Every structure is written in C-alpha cells, then in structure tokens.
Amino acid sequence: MDAIRQLLREARSIAVLTGAGVSAESGVPTFRGADGLWKQYRALDLATPEAFERDPKLVWEWYDWRRSLISKARPNSAHLALAELERQSRHFTLITQNVDDLHDDAGSRNILKVHGSIWIVRCTECGRERTDRRVPLPELPPKCDCGGLLRPGVVWFGESLPAGIWEKAEEAAHDAAVFLVIGTSAVVYPSAGLVQTSRRGGAKVIEINVETTPVSGTVDECLLGSAAELLPRLMA
Ligand code: BV8
Ligand code: ZN
C-alpha cells in the first residue's frame, strides 16, 4: 500500500474508471452481483432502445424505482476519497460508468459520465434535456411540454457513448501515469477498453475490486477488497 500511496502522490496525471461497485456501500444495487439489477429485472433487456420502444412504461417503472433508491443514497468513503485524491493531484480525471451522480455529490469536479445520468430526462421528440429529480415521477412514462415521450438520459446497450465525453475519456486514459479501475466488472465495452488504452499509454494500472475480473490479469496491482475500505487507506 505504501508504494501505491507514493505512486499516487508523485503521479503527474491520474485517471480513474469507476463502476457500480463504488456505489455498493451507499446501498445502490450493482448490476451483476448476487442481488444485482440484471438478475431481478432482466436489465439487459430493459436497458435498450428496443425495450423502450416496445414498452416505455415498463422501462420507466424500472428507472423510477432506481431513481427513488438512489435519491436515498449518500456518497460513501470511496466517493469521498476520490474527491480528496482529485484535490491533491495535478491532473485528475474521473471517468464513471455510474449514472447515480454520487461522485458529484461527493465533491468530485472533473467527471466524465460515459453512460449518462439517471437524473437527466431527454425528450424523444424535441430532444430537450433537463435535470428532473422528482421521485416518484408524477406519471409514467413522463411527457415533455411538447407532448413528446421523455426517456432517461442514460446510454443504453447498442447506443454510442456521448461523443465529446468518450473522446475525453480515451485521452485521459491514454495520458494517465496512473490508472485506477475501481468497482467494475469490466465486461461492458467500450468503457472496459479504457484499461487497455491506459496500458498502451504507459500507465501503471491498479484495480480495486472485491473479486477478480477479466482485466485483473492485465493490471500492475490488483487490490482485493472493498473500495470504501481500501481507497481511504490509500489517501492517508
Ligand atoms: C456500444 C446505463 C456500439 C444504463 C449501461 C459482445 C461482446 C462485447 C461487447 C458487446 C457484445 N454485444 C454487445 C456489445 C456492446 C455492449 C456491451 O459491452 N455489452 C456487454 C454486456 C457484453 N456495449 C454497448 O452496447 C455500449 N454501446 O457498444 O455502442 C455503437 C458504437 C458506435 C455507434 C453506435 C453504437 C453501451 C454500453 C452502456 C450500456 N449502459 N448502463 C443504466 O445504468 O441503466 S451498462 C451498465 O453496466 C452500467 O452502466 C454499469 O455501469 C455498467 C458496467 O457494470 P459495472 O458498473 O461494472 O457494475 P457490475 O454490477 O457489472 O459490477 C460491479 C463490480 O463491482 C463487480 O466487479 C463487483 O465485484 C464490484 N464490487 C461490488 N462491491 C464492491 C465492488 N468493488 C469494490 N468495492 C465494493 N464494495
Ligand atoms: Zn419535447
């Protein structure tokens, strides 16, 4: 741990990729864990444009349920430690696959949300986007003032990642001297590919997870444990 603390202190640039595992200790269910969202809700079928096309009410019931769960969640020590690491670092980019905005609530600043935010709604007719934090939503599916159907402002399977944001994430991963990959099962692409991108750019890659993942064999250090427990210890 000392060597890693030293590495983080001296790094000229740090990039971090987080997944649902960093919000687990805030009570937000992960996707693929034992009590995961995928299990109960066939999420892989729900988080798609086709599912929304077929049954927008069903898809919104899932998101409305997640929104009310997330509205009760607070950042945990993993989120707070990452906000602290950013304050101590010269160049720091936080790339998150999470849509819960808990990194914002923890005080992180330079955040790239590659899968969007569950608090954004976007009109499928006029394209207008806005933050809507109402839980529960008054009607499902919610409608825009223009009468169009609103959709969650997240990236679904089969959809491309927000253009500008994705380019910045690739650049940050490539330029990083240290790349932290935390609390992600590293199975969703292209986000999981950022680990390889950082290695190609010469980064020291450190993984923090409670279990090994498909990238564990490619990283320099694999710290097995909870992010909420390990990250604060890396900051001390
Ligand atoms: C695209 C937003 C193309 C919505 C999400 C076959 C092979 C390879 C790829 C594909 C394929 N078929 C299709 C694809 C592409 C597909 C994909 O990767 N599929 C996977 C499932 C195989 N990807 C896409 O479709 C992407 N788009 O490719 O577009 C394209 C290109 C150009 C032009 C047009 C189109 C879009 C992907 C984004 C999908 N949206 N979510 C929503 O949230 O509802 S994905 C979803 O999974 C979440 O965003 C989540 O963030 C993401 C990854 O999951 P994790 O965050 O890693 O969470 P998970 O539960 O899986 O893991 C938790 C981890 O934490 C575990 O490892 C656990 O051990 C650990 N953990 C638990 N507790 C702790 C902990 N770690 C530390 N501490 C703890 N306490
Ligand atoms: Zn509209």
Image (tube, helix red, strand yellow):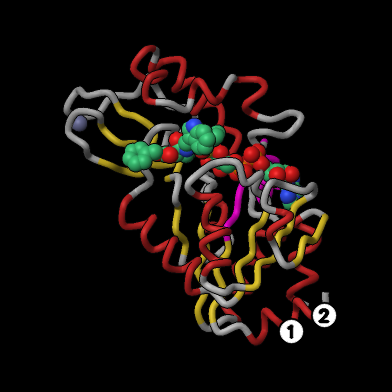
Q: Residue at x 49, y 27 (%)?
A: 64
Quarter of image, res 69:
top right
Q: Amino acid at mark 1?
A: Gln
Quarter of image, res 134:
top left
- Label 1: element kind: helix
Q: Residue at x 52, y 57 (%)?
A: 194
Mark 1 surroundings: few (<14), some (14-19) or many (≥20) residues within 10 A: few
Residue sticking out furthest to the top: 54
Is label 2's Cβ within 8 Å of ligand 1?
Answer: no
Q: Nearer the viewer, residue 124 or 119?
A: 124
Name the residue tied to disc 2. Answer: 2
Q: Is residue 174 left or right of residue 77?
A: left
| Rendered position, 77 above or below 187 | below
Does the CB distance between marks 1 and 2 fall below 8 Å? yes
Q: Position of residue 189 (x, y in %)?
A: 50, 44
Q: Residue at x 44, y 61 (%)?
A: 169
Determine if the magenta segment contains residue 21: yes
Q: Position of residue 164 (x, y in %)?
A: 31, 57
Name the residue tied to disc 1. Answer: 6
Stretch in magenta: 17-29
Q: Can you say which quadrant of the picture contains the N terminus?
A: bottom right
Q: Is residue 53 left or right of residue 128?
A: right
Q: Quadrant of ligand 2?
A: top left
Is label 1's Cβ within 8 Å of ligand 1?
Answer: no
Q: Is residue 133 visible?
A: no
Mark 2 surroundings: few (<14), some (14-19) or many (≥20) residues within 10 A: few
Q: Residue at x 45, y 20 (%)?
A: 59
Q: Is residue 32 left or right of residue 42?
A: right
